[in-house]
Image (cartoon, helix red, strand yellow):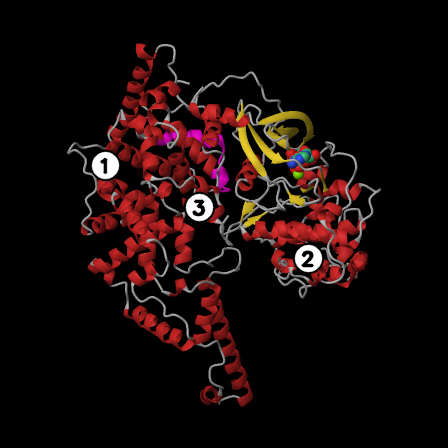
C-alpha cells in the first residue's frame, strides 16, 4: 500500500460505521460514531458501481461545496475518505428533517416556531449566496434538523457557482413543487432568486402542513401556481413572455393567497409575498429577508431546542417521484449496482503499488 | 465561491512553501535535474492546454486541471506514476467541477490524438483506467476541488467586475455604460418634447432653452462607482495592458506560482509585468493615450472635490494601493518572469505562438530587460521530444532501483520513498 492510501486508511479508521439509515439517488447513508469521542455521525457512501463513466456530477458537487462552506445552518462535512474506490462523506448526524416534522400530525406549530425555522433557513441561504453559490434544490426534505433543534441546509448535489452573470445554466433544477415560474418557463440565466422562491413555498407549507403548490407535471405546476396566485401580468413581471419555454397560462384572476398564511400576521404575510414575487428581479434577497420586520416585531422566534420535533427517529424513505424531477439534464442516472468490495485495483495510482 | 478565499481549502491547505515543494520533488530529482523537471512541467501544462482545447474547454477548467496536476505531484513523483494518465484525469475532473462536463470516452479519444502527436505511447486508452485514476486523483487532492484563479482577481483589480461577484447584477463598466445610455435617451426625449412643444420649424433654437444637464454629474458618477468597491478600479487600464496581464496569467500555470501565491498576488504580479512592458517598449507606449492621462487628471480633481483620496496616478502607486507585501509581490513577479527564457529554450516561440500569441515573447523581453538571470540550462538543447524520452527514462530507472536486490521484499513505492529520506 502506498503512502497516500495509508494516510487515507488512518483517516477512515477514525469512524465506526453502523447500520444503514437511508438511501438517496447516489448514496447510501449509514449511522456511525467517531471512535475517539463517541459522537454520532452519518456516513454517506457514494454508489460508485463499476466506475465506468467516472464519478457522478452530483456527488462531486456535494463534495466540492461542503468542503468550502462552513456555517451553523449548513450541514457540516467532517471528513472525506475512500474505501475500495468508494467515496465516503462523514457528516454531522442529524436526527430528522423538516419534511418529517411537517408531516408529523401530532406536532403543533406556533407562528414563533415557523419564524425560527424560516430565520435559520435564511441565515444558511444568505451565507450560501454570499459565497456565490446557488443551492437549486431547497425543499423541506433537504432542511435537516439537529438534536439541538438547529436547522441545517443539506444536499448540494445540484448546487453551482453563479459568479458570472453571463453563464447559461440548465433550467431543470429544483424539485418541481418548489420551482419558481421563471425556471418552469425555461429561464437559462437566473439568480439566487430561484432559491428564494423555494423558501417562500416552504414557509407557506409550514403553515398549511401540505405542499403549497403540488403540480403533477411542469405544465400543471404553472397552472397550480397561477391558480393559487393569479396569472402574472406584464406589470407584475416585465418581460416574462420572452422566456424560452413561455406558453400562455393566462386567465387566472388575482387571488389574495396570502390569507392562507394569516396565522403569521401581517408581517409574515408580507414576507411571504416578498419571497413569492413572480418577477425574480423584484423578489427579496436572503440578506434583505433577514432584515424583514417579521423577525424583529411581535413574538420572538422560538429557541431551536424548544422547537417541535418528532419522537420517532428518522427512517429511510422511498424516493418520491418528484425528487427525481430536479436532476440536471446532463445527469445520466447511474445504475444502481452494488459496488464490488472484493474488486482489486486494476491499475495502481502508482506504477508499482 | 467567489468571496471567501481566506476561508477556502485553497488558502488553508494548498499554499505551500518553497521548501515543501523542494521536499516533494526529492524522488524525481534523483532521475532528473531541477531544470529538466521545470521543463517537464512546461511540457505537461502544454499537453493539458492542448487536450483542453480539443475538448472545447474554456480557460478556467484548463487552469483548474493544471492546478490539480501540480497539486497531485506535491504528493507523488513523476517517476512513480503515469503522468499522461494523471493529466487526462485532471482534465476530466476539472471539466466536471467547472460545470462543463465531457464524457469519459471523449477524454480518452482526444487524449489519444494529442499524445500521438507527441509520440507518447504510455497512455492506456481505456475509459475504466481513467475512471480509476480519477478516483486516486481525488484522494490525493484530499477531495479539495475548488481552485481560485487569478482571472477573477484581475477583473476585480481592474474594475471590470463588481468587487463582490453576485452582489451587483452588472459590472462597474456595464453599469456606467447603462447609466450613460439612459441619460442620453432622457436628454433626447427632453429635446424631442421641447421641440414638439415649440412647434414645427423651431428645432434649431429649442436646444438652448433646455435646462442645464440634469443627468448624473461626473462627481456623482465617481461617487457611485467608488461606493461599489474601494475605488481601486478607477485607474483606467487600457485594453493592451489588460490583455498582456491576462496572457501572463495563462503563462503562470507553467510555473510554481499557483502553488505558492494566492490568486490576487499572481494577478497583481501579472499587472505589474504588463505595466512594465507597456511603459518600456516604444510600441506599447502608444497605448497610453493622452485622453487616458487627462482622464486620470480629471478624476484626481473630482476626488479632491469630493474629499476622497486621489486615485493612483502611476503604476507604482496603483500597485501600492493594494496593500500587499511588496517582497511577496516581487518574488511572484520573479517566479513568473523566470519562466520565459527557460520556456523559450524549451519550445522556441514559433512553436508556441499558437498557444499564447505574442504576449509571452513580449514578457520574455521584459524579463530580459529586468536583468533577470534565471537558472540557465547546461548548454544542452532540451525540447519536447527530450521531455517525452526523459519521462520514460525516469520511470525505467526508478523501476530498476525499486527492483534492485537491496529492496527485495519491499519493492513498493512506499519503500522507495523511505529510501530517499
Ligand atoms: N447527516 C445525516 N444524518 C442523518 N441521516 C441522514 C443524514 N444525511 C442523510 N440522511 C438520511 O439518509 C437519507 C438519504 O440521504 P441523501 O441525502 O443521500 O438522499 P436524499 O436527499 O434523501 O435523496 P436525493 O439523493 O434523491 O436527494 C435521507 O433521506 C436521510 O434519511
Ligand atoms: Mg435530498
Rendered residue at 55%/88% (across/down): B197
The region drawn magenta spans: B95-114
What is the crowding at mark 2: few (fewer than 14 residues within 10 Å), some, or many (at least 20)? many
Secondary structure, mark 3, is loop
Q: Which chain hosts label 3?
A: B
> Mark 2 or 1, which is nearer the eye?
2
**Spatial CA span between label 2 and label 3:** 32 Å
Q: Nearer the viewer, residue A150 or B86?
A: A150
Q: Is residue B416 magenta?
A: no
> Mark 2 or 3, which is nearer the eye?
3
Q: Is mark 2 within 8 Å of ligand 2?
A: no
- The mark tally for this picture is 3
Left or right: B308 as drawn, with respect to A234: left
Report ligand 1 position as a quadrant. Answer: top right
Up the image or down, A207 lies above or below A18; here it is below
Rendered residue at 29%/32% (across/down): B40
Amino acid at each position: 500500500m502506498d503512502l497516500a492510501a495509508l494516510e487515507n486508511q488512518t483517516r477512515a479508521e477514525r469512524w465506526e460505521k453502523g447500520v444503514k439509515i437511508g438511501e438517496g439517488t447516489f448514496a447510501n447513508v449509514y449511522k456511525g460514531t467517531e471512535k475517539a469521542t463517541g459522537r454520532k455521525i452519518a456516513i454517506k457512501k457514494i454508489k460508485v458501481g463499476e466506475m465506468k463513466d467516472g464519478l457522478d456530477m452530483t456527488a462531486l458537487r456535494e463534495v466540492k461545496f461542503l468542503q468550502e462552506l462552513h456555517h451553523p445552518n449548513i450541514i457540516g462535512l467532517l471528513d472525506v475518505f475512500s474505501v475500495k474506490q468508494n467515496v465516503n462523506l462523514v457528516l454531522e448526524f442529524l436526527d430528522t428533517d423538516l419534511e418529517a416534522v411537517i408531516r408529523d400530525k401530532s406536532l403543533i406549530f406556533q407562528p414563533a416556531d415557523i419564524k425560527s425555522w424560516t430565520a435559520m433557513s435564511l441565515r444558511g441561504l444568505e451565507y450560501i449566496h454570499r459565497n456565490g453559490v446557488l443551492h437549486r434544490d431547497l425543499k423541506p426534505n433537504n432542511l435537516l434538523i439537529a438534536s439541538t433543534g438547529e436547522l441545517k441546509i443539506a444536499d448540494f448535489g445540484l448546487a453551482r457557482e453563479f459568479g458570472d452573470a453571463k453563464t447559461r445554466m440548465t433550467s431543470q433544477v429544483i424539485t418541481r413543487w418548489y420551482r419558481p415560474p421563471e425556471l418552469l418557463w425555461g429561464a437559462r440565466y437566473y439568480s439566487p432568486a430561484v432559491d428564494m422562491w423555494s423558501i417562500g413555498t416552504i414557509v407557506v407549507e409550514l403553515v398549511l402542513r401540505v405542499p403549497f403548490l403540488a403540480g403533477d407535471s411542469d405544465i400543471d405546476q404553472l397552472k397550480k401556481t397561477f391558480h393559487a396566485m393569479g396569472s402574472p401580468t406584464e406589470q407584475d413581471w416585465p418581460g416574462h413572455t420572452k422566456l424560452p419555454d413561455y406558453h400562455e397560462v393566462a386567465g387566472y384572476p388575482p387571488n389574495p393567497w396570502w390569507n392562507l398564511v394569516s396565522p403569521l400576521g401581517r408581517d409574515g404575510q408580507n414576507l411571504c409575498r416578498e419571497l413569492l414575487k413572480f418577477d425574480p428581479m423584484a423578489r427579496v434577497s436572503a440578506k434583505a429577508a433577514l432584515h424583514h420586520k417579521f423577525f424583529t416585531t411581535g413574538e420572538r422566534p422560538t429557541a431551536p431546542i424548544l422547537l417541535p420535533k418528532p419522537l420517532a427517529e428518522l427512517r429511510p424513505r422511498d424516493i418520491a417521484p418528484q425528487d427525481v424531477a430536479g436532476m440536471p439534464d446532463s445527469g445520466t442516472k447511474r445504475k444502481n449496482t452494488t459496488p464490488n468490495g472484493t474488486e482489486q485495483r486494476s491499475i495502481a495510482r502508482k506504477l508499482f503499488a | 465561491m467567489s468571496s471567501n478565499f481566506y476561508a477556502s481549502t485553497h488558502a488553508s491547505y494548498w499554499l505551500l512553501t518553497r521548501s515543501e515543494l523542494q521536499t516533494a520533488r526529492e524522488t524525481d530529482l534523483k532521475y532528473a535535474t531541477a531544470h529538466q523537471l521545470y521543463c517537464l512541467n512546461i511540457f505537461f501544462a502544454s499537453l493539458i492546454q492542448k487536450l483542453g482545447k480539443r475538448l472545447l474547454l474554456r480557460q478556467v477548467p484548463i487552469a483548474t486541471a493544471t492546478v490539480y496536476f501540480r497539486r497531485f505531484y506535491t504528493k507523488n513523483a513523476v517517476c512513480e506514476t503515469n503522468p499522461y494518465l494523471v493529466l487526462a484525469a485532471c482534465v476530466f475532473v476539472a471539466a466536471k467541477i467547472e460545470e462543463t462536463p465531457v464524457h469519459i470516452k471523449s477524454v480518452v479519444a482526444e487524449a489519444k490524438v494529442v499524445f500521438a502527436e507527441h509520440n507518447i505511447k504510455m497512455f492506456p486508452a481505456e475509459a475504466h483506467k481513467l475512471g480509476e485514476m480519477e478516483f486516486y486523483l481525488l484522494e490525493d487532492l484530499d477531495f479539495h476541488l475548488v481552485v481560485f484563479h487569478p482571472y477573477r482577481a484581475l477583473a476585480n483589480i481592474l474594475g471590470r467586475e463588481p468587487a463582490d461577484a453576485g452582489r451587483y447584477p452588472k459590472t462597474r463598466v456595464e453599469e456606467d455604460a447603462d447609466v450613460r445610455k439612459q441619460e442620453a435617451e432622457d436628454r433626447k426625449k427632453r429635446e424631442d418634447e421641447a421641440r414638439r412643444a415649440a412647434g414645427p420649424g423651431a428645432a434649431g433654437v429649442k436646444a438652448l432653452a433646455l435646462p442645464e444637464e440634469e443627468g448624473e454629474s461626473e462627481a456623482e458618477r465617481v461617487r457611485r462607482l467608488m461606493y461599489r468597491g474601494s475605488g481601486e478600479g478607477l485607474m483606467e487600464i487600457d485594453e493592451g495592458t489588460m490583455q498582456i496581464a491576462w496572457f501572463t496569467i495563462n503563462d503562470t500555470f507553467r510555473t510554481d506560482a499557483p502553488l505558492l501565491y494566492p490568486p490576487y498576488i499572481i494577478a497583481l504580479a501579472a499587472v505589474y509585468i504588463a505595466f512594465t512592458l507597456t511603459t518600456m517598449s516604444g510600441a506599447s507606449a502608444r497605448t497610453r493615450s493622452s485622453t487616458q492621462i487627462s482622464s486620470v487628471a480629471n478624476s484626481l480633481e473630482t476626488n479632491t472635490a469630493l474629499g476622497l483620496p486621489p486615485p493612483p496616478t502611476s503604476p507604482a502607486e496603483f500597485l501600492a494601493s493594494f496593500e500587499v507585501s511588496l517582497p511577496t509581490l516581487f518574488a511572484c513577479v520573479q517566479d513568473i518572469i523566470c519562466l520565459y527564457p527557460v520556456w523559450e529554450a524549451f519550445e522556441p516561440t514559433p512553436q508556441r505562438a499558437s498557444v499564447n500569441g505574442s504576449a509571452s515573447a513580449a514578457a520574455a523581453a521584459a524579463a530580459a530587460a529586468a536583468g533577470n538571470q534565471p537558472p540557465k540550462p547546461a548548454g544542452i538543447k532540451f525540447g519536447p521530444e527530450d521531455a517525452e524520452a526523459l519521462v520514460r527514462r525516469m520511470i525505467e530507472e526508478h523501476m530498476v532501483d525499486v527492483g534492485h536486490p537491496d529492496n527485495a521484499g519491499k519493492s513498493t513505492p512506499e519503500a522507495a520513498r523511505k529510501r530517499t529520506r
